[in-house]
Image (cartoon, grey):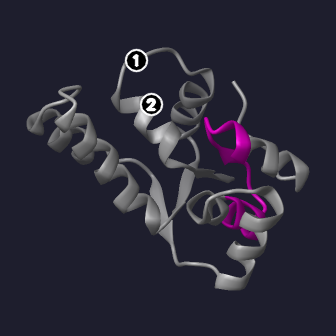
């Protein structure tokens, strides 16, 4: 089985600001499952890392190591969904288009969604999309 991994969970693996049981559960699932991400995830993760560098939460060497670690994980990027679907989800659930892409992917693949975003989690539950739980 697989699950959709969002950028909030991935970022929690990098920054040790606190404990996130959902992020821990998603990380543990990677030992025996693959994660699926939208192509957007690649950009989001790099943006999170560069912003972390600017805020002095991480340095360039740690960024490079984190990206190297991610490349060894069973994470597969998927192509983008139809624009109409993403816009409809964003409108219905009052989500950003970015978050709606994760919701669409989990729904299209019929797999759980791993997120730390409360609004996105609520939208998934409203659409009967299972969540990765701790």
Q: Quadrant of residue 84?
A: bottom right
* 27 is higher (above) or lower (below) than 126: above
Q: Quadrant of residue 20?
A: top right
Q: Quadrant of the C terminus?
A: top right
Residue 132 image point, x, y percent:
70, 38
Q: Is residue 116 left or right of residue 70?
A: right
* 107 is higher (above) or lower (below) than 52: below
Q: Which mark is residue 12?
A: 2
Q: Residues within 10 Å of mark 2 (few under 14, many from 20)?
A: some
Q: Quadrant of residue 95?
A: bottom right
Query: Can see residue 69?
Result: no
Q: Is residue 38 left or right of residue 62?
A: right
Residue 12 image point, x, y percent:
44, 30
Secondary element at image label 2: helix
Query: Can see residue 29?
Result: yes
Picture residue at 70% right of the left edge, 59% below the top: 103
74 or 112: nearer the viewer: 112
97 or 113: nearer the viewer: 97
Q: Which mark is residue 17?
A: 1
Mark 1 and mark 2 in contact? Answer it, CB < 8 Å.
Answer: yes
Picture residue at 44% right of the left edge, 59% below the top: 41
* 124 is higher (above) or lower (below) than 105: above
Q: Is residue 66 left or right of residue 12?
A: left
User: Which circle's residue, 1 or 2, is located before the other in the chain?
Assistant: 2
- What span is in magenta? 103-120
CA distance for labels 1 and 2: 8 Å
Q: Is residue 111 magenta?
A: yes
82 or 96: nearer the viewer: 96
Q: Is residue 102 magenta?
A: no
């Amino acid at each position: 089985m697989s699950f959709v991994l969002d950028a909030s969970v991935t970022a929690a693996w990098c920054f040790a600001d606190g404990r996130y049981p959902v992020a821990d559960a998603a990380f543990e699932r990677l030992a025996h499952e693959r994660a699926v991400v939208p192509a957007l995830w690649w950009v989001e993760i790099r943006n999170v890392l560069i912003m972390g560098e600017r805020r002095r939460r991480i340095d360039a060497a740690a960024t490079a190591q984190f990206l190297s670690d991610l490349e060894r994980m069973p994470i597969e990027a998927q192509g983008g969904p139809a624009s109409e679907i993403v816009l409809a989800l964003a409108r219905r659930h009052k989500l950003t288009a970015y978050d709606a892409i994760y919701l669409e992917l989990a729904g299209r693949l019929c797999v759980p969604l791993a997120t730390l975003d409360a609004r996105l989690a609520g939208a998934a539950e409203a659409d009967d999309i299972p969540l990765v739980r701790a």
